Image (cartoon, rainbow, N blue to C red):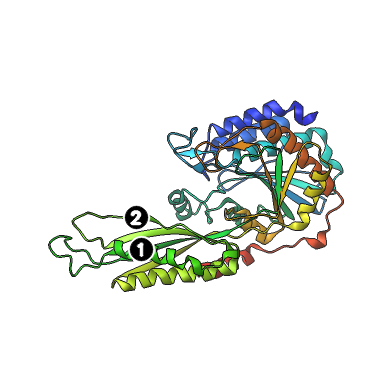
Amino acid sequence: MHFKNQYESIKEIAQDIYHHPELGYKENQTKQKVIDYLKDVNPNIQLEEFSLTGLKTSLGDKTKELNIAFIAELDAVYAPSHMYADKNTGAAHNCGHYTQTAIALALYHYLFTSGAYKHWDYKISFIFIPAEEYLDLTYRDTLIQKGKITHYGGKPEAMKLGVFDDIDLGICVHAIGGEFSERTIEINCDLAGFLYKKYTFKGKATHAGFDPFPAKNAYSMSTLFNTAVGLSRQQLAEAEHVRINPIVMDSDMSTNVIPNRITVGTDLRTRTVDYLKEAAIKLDDAAKGSALALQGDVECHTQMGYLPFVQDRYLSTFVMESFKESDEIAVILNNNFISAAGDIGDLSFMMPCIQIGYSGFTGTIHGDDFIDVDPEFIYEIFPRFLSQTLEKMNGAIDTSKLYRRTYDEYLTLINSIVD
């Protein structure tokens, strides 16, 4: 009855966040709403603030050696054409993060008021984290220049700050894209990793009509590069689910002047780190060859996105056990791969992580019409299911199956990819 009784208040919070979306590292109103709710539930709560808008709080005896993080993402997507986008910022909650936040609050309320966590052999830490979406990079560049952050993504930044230093494993949840006829969850859905590549083609400008002959057309170089990328796709391993999407990012072109500078940007997604490096070399060669073919030059810039995410199959067994006993969830999807990416991949390099998917939405994820249509499932049934999964973990986690890497090891890996 607990989740049923708190359903309306949790749904109201979710709807409020949905209609007031904020981009990463700017989630000030969302952060305050989370704080207000947590303090209303637990007036004596201790909150740790980090990364401008991040929050962390824990339940459980400090002497317990094991600590599980339940992670909720606070930020919205930049989607100005979305039906409920913020008219000033273009932010829209069409990735479902607003439901993650509400689910985490529902779970915290249940655990604190019921005291269910007190008999567990582990602590549970709720981490409300900013900036999962890789966007608004100009703003984040200013934060980096001012020394306020180091990483574009919220989880790598939290890793650097030590937010996860006392955590042994991470649990995240995420909306599943698409509509489902039955209530559905998903486990073991792995994600791609990606780099962000920028190529600035450089040529020589002359009058396009009077004297085009000595010119070196930077736009033509970028066109040749686009063609090279298209023709190279058959040489990219299908098993790696490679995704490349070049766009013109910057140019100052006029129809009467041969363009001498144009910047093309693309993300590069693959399933594994090794192939990410290999495909990046192929992409760089295509850019260099395209510039050389037209007697120009190109400047290549690589920016780290996120690491691939391989879900921890051992931890997922607890979710499967709960599903088998559930009479409220009809379908479980298992062992899929999608070329979407998330900074949960970076965290999973340091420790075992899972991300449990849940249905209940209509419209296209990251699309203009994305919204929840089964709030009862999202805000009542699914949090109850999560509490049952956490209960199953009590006294049953084999710590020998967990692993731990350091932030310095993470940096070493990242630098090996970007360099």
Dot 2 surroundings within 10 Å: few (below 14), some, or many (20 or more)? few
In this orientation, which residue lies closer to the viewer: 157 or 374?
374
In this orientation, which residue lies closer to the viewer: 13 or 127?
13
Residue furthest to the left in view is: 210
Q: Which mark is residue 200?
A: 1
| Circle count | 2
Dot 1 surroundings within 10 Å: few (below 14), some, or many (20 or more)? many
In this orientation, which residue lies closer to the viewer: 150 or 413?
413
Where is residue 56 drawn, in percent x and y? 67, 44
Cα distance, mark 2 to mark 1? 9 Å
Compare marks 2 and 1 and give the one earlier in the sequence: 1
Where is residue 69 drawn, in percent x and y? 72, 49
**In the rendered image of this protein, does residue 24 appear above or below residue 195?**
above
Where is residue 44 drawn, in percent x and y? 73, 35
Kindly state the secondary structure of the residue where label 2 is placed: strand
Q: Residue at x 76, y 46 (%)?
A: 124
Q: Amino acid at mark 1?
A: Thr
Q: Residue at x 17, y 68 (%)?
A: 213
Residue 14 in view here: yes
**Residue tagged by mark 2?**
250
**In the rendered image of this protein, does residue 14 appear above or below residue 188?**
above
Q: Residue at x 68, y 27 (%)?
A: 9
In this orientation, which residue lies closer to the viewer: 298 or 42?
298
Kindly state the secondary structure of the residue where label 1 is placed: strand
Residue 29: image quadrant is: top right
Residue 411 in view here: no
Whether the residues at callouts 2 and 1 have beta carbons within 8 Å, the answer is yes
Where is residue 252 drawn, in percent x and y? 27, 55
User: Which quadrant is home to the N terminus?
Assistant: top right
Q: Amino acid at mark 2?
A: Asp
Q: Which mark is residue 304?
A: none
